[in-house]
Image (cartoon, coloured by chain):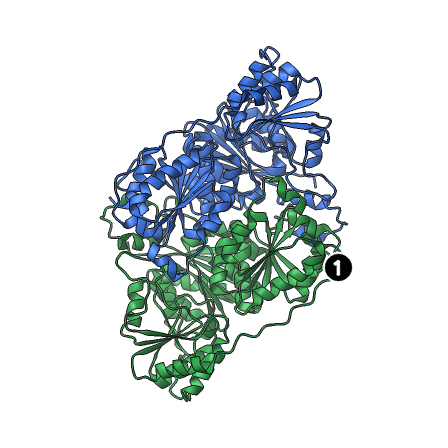
Chain colours: A green, B blue
Amino acid sequence: MNGAESLVRTLVGSGVDVCFANPGTSEMHFVAALDEVPEMRAVLGLFEGVVTGAADGYGRMRGSPAATLLHLGPGLANGIANLHNARRARTPVVNIVGDHATSHRALDAPLQSDIESLARPVSRWYRETETAGQLAADGADAVAAAIGPPGGVATLVVPADVSWAVAGDPAPARPATAPASVTGDAVERAAKALRSGEPAALLIGGTATRARGLAAATRSAAATGATLLCETFPAVLERGAGLPPIERLGYFPEMAARQLSGLRHLVLAGAASPVSFFAYEGVPGDLVPDGCQVHGLAGAGDDVPGALEELAEALGASGDEVRLQPGERPSRPAGRLDAVAAGAAIGALLAEGTIVCDEANTSGFFVHGATAGAPRHHWLCLTGGAIGQGLPLATGAAVACPDQKVLCLEADGSAMYTFQSLWTQAREGLDVTTVIFNNRSYAILGIELERTGVRAPHPRASDLFDLARPPLDFVALAEAMGVGASRATTAAEFTVALERALATPGPSLIEAVIDSGL
Amino acid sequence: MNGAESLVRTLVGSGVDVCFANPGTSEMHFVAALDEVPEMRAVLGLFEGVVTGAADGYGRMRGSPAATLLHLGPGLANGIANLHNARRARTPVVNIVGDHATSHRALDAPLQSDIESLARPVSRWYRETETAGQLAADGADAVAAAIGPPGGVATLVVPADVSWAVAGDPAPARPATAPASVTGDAVERAAKALRSGEPAALLIGGTATRARGLAAATRSAAATGATLLCETFPAVLERGAGLPPIERLGYFPEMAARQLSGLRHLVLAGAASPVSFFAYEGVPGDLVPDGCQVHGLAGAGDDVPGALEELAEALGASGDEVRLQPGERPSRPAGRLDAVAAGAAIGALLAEGTIVCDEANTSGFFVHGATAGAPRHHWLCLTGGAIGQGLPLATGAAVACPDQKVLCLEADGSAMYTFQSLWTQAREGLDVTTVIFNNRSYAILGIELERTGVRAPHPRASDLFDLARPPLDFVALAEAMGVGASRATTAAEFTVALERALATPGPSLIEAVIDSGL
């Protein structure tokens, strides 16, 4: 077999049997190997941002990596923004980047570029394979590096001649590495801080935002009266009726500062020390209040849920005081379709097991609250702030979990970054309902402009946030790519459309024309 | 004034008065400055690949840079593929990349990334401004670096606090640097090679593919009997009736090898020594035949047209032997709509002064030949092989040249990379006619797969080139973004639609459903 086939077989043998792909000439032997290795499922994306964002969604839900197949430096570059999000989510992803043949690199052909320089900022592991005989072993190493712990993006660059030359057998899967247990000292320090009687908070993130970590963290918080918070944009948050509810740290620094105000102790479990998303003139970026001590219980590569369970044990937290989220839903909304009404409709209808991919930005502020008491579900966030993530993320999550409905909450501006995702959803028959919150603007930027204190009127600045000239027809865009769609302009229309979409398997889209009251 | 305003005023004072933009929070002070400096025109793109590709098209046609406005590392990353093409075209482009405030960088906020590592592979000049007082000078330096010679991409990273802090006056424009004159020795060596009596060719590229360089090169070739060739993908080729015709080097190595076969001398003027686009097993990547001497007359940073004129003088080439392209057009086609018929229709209808942006890939093979005798026009190619360039390039060219019609020849697969460009065309009322050659496949990859020698059938491999499942409705896509569109399925329909579109100012799109005979 050739190098490419040895790589594909190694990936499959290491548990990587889905490849999101947009290949070119230098990847053609990998593509040809698909006919030799039917265990590998290739999913085509019409743009690399779809490919990498889908790999992020897949890896978050599956906990094990998908591969991507990307075409030299430019193909990788198109996927970097969503790899940035995957890096922040610590999602396991294995990038296979085809390159020119080793003999061709010195010739500076038109597609030649510095792939390493492009890949390093998003990759926790990077390697270029130089011989076909080495490719299988490098592939197995890449999978292991992606899995971690912590998970992350591993990028393997495969020159064309390494793919086409004769290679040996596939490499065996590398043994899994368990996340590190935290020391008794770290647990004891955290326990001491929480039971100090001084204002204290426990901030969780990373692998702690699933049911097991949440349960343990909630026990400790309930037993000590500490505030329990979750990082602003968790990769996957399990929530809903019967699970412990948790408050997310606010996006704007003023909101987060209020949540953290007066604290003397902040215990971190899988979360970084809190900082504001952006810097603003005269506003501190480091959100830890003066006089607050920060205690690291468990970092990203540690067994964070295990550490939280040890903490609860050390505190003797029985869990008796824990208040689980009761089942409760908003009523079906009526009247005009604003962000509150849209949130209520989603809260009223969300079904158990749904995977919510949230890139609704300003329009989505109310959806999170309105779904707090809905049946148990997963909530996936924009972890790295690189927009254009929601539609691809939903695509990959649906590939990972074919038995679960995916609900993608998407802002109009962000949707236009990677709208091609819908074609992949149609092609693969994925069970994704997309809601486009169309407020015909980059609304967040209007808010940010006001925050600069700029004098009004500012017609030329505001024009750069205006998506109404011309208006975008998201129904037509979806249908042009094979996804059935409808438009809702009232709360009732939206509720009916959503109910139908959620009850119907396969991809669909609802354009929610949001009345922002302006 | 603050740093941002000092930068915008400096850019305008340096001749950069168009900014293709997709800003975010960290660029908000630059955006606010637009209301203070009305001389700067901001053009919004819904994705950064649109922004950077438009800057490429603008710079190619104007010969001076536009600015881009990009949002941190991920915003830059989304624009890298088209910056790669701009780098290969040596297009002057000034990237303004907003970054976190200097105080915020150490906090590793979610959008933090290694911008320099991302930018270096596409930038001939890179700088991060550290103080507001330095920003105007850095802006002027960036413009000068972009202009060159040779032209290229200059990337200036502007932290948010550098934008918002108080700054001094704008900086004056830097004096222009003239391209270097080549030595008499280089001219003499080239002249000696061409008049050696041995098989010789003159390969031109870069700034030599405009009328002046073409005229001089043609004189030398005609006087000596040397073969005259142009690089495969020129940035801007001037051609048509009354200009010297020129043959482009072939894309596949076998085609190029035939053109170069038997040569003993190859003189390079603004072109790199020829190499194949991709490497293939058993095919040399360096296309210079054995026994052929390569003579560098003029490099990218030199005055290439001037060098060609000196060469013609040294050869005593009067130009009497030069055969200019006669005016001739194909007949209007009838019958089925295949690539030949589409080419004929375009050749029959192309008007003087049209700017053709060619990313038609396999479907466009016949258009170039069919337009050789059309009235004089510009032909812009995919210089770097990073697809998704055509629609943005046309957008920027139309902004640069509002009095010229732009005709964008676009393949279906490539179109889907940066289809958002149409919205900018509608918003700005740009005079662009887009032809989508819809053969419902990545046809080039089908060819490339066969070249690997893989055994048929290969259904799983071929499925990755299939864009028919589901079919893409380009008419609906265009209309959804405010661009009027029609579909043509016969040669006559296409010809009528094209004639109407070319006669009507403003953006329009024709989906040409190509019958590939399969």
A499 to the left or right of B318: left
Query: Can you say whether A82 is above or below B143 in the image?
Result: below
Q: Please name whichever residue, B239 or A478, is drawn nearer the observer in this view of the structure.
A: B239
Q: Which residue is mark 1?
A: A168
Where does the image place residue A25, in percent across and percent down from the top left? 65, 46
Occupied quadrant, residue A143: bottom right
Disc 1 residue type (three-letter) = Gly
Residue A461 visible in the picture: no
Q: Please name whichever residue, B456 or A474, is drawn nearer the observer in this view of the structure.
A: B456
B223 to the left or right of B352: right
Occupied quadrant, residue B315: top right
Where does the image place residue B471, in percent across and percent down from the top left? 59, 48
**What is the secondary structure assignment of the residue under circle 1?**
loop
How many marks the image carries: the answer is 1
Occupied quadrant, residue B334: top right
| Chain letter of disc 1 in the image | A
The residue drawn where x is 48% and y is 37% is B393
Q: Quadrant of the N terminus of chain A?
A: bottom right
Query: Can you say whether A311 is above or below A139 in the image?
Result: below
B70 to the left or right of B166: right
Instruction: Classify 10 Å Cα crowding around label 1: few (below 14), some (14-19), many (20 and above).
Output: some
Where does the image place residue A290, in percent across and percent down from the top left? 28, 70
Query: Can you say whether B83 is above or below A2 in the image?
Result: above
Residue A241 visible in the picture: yes
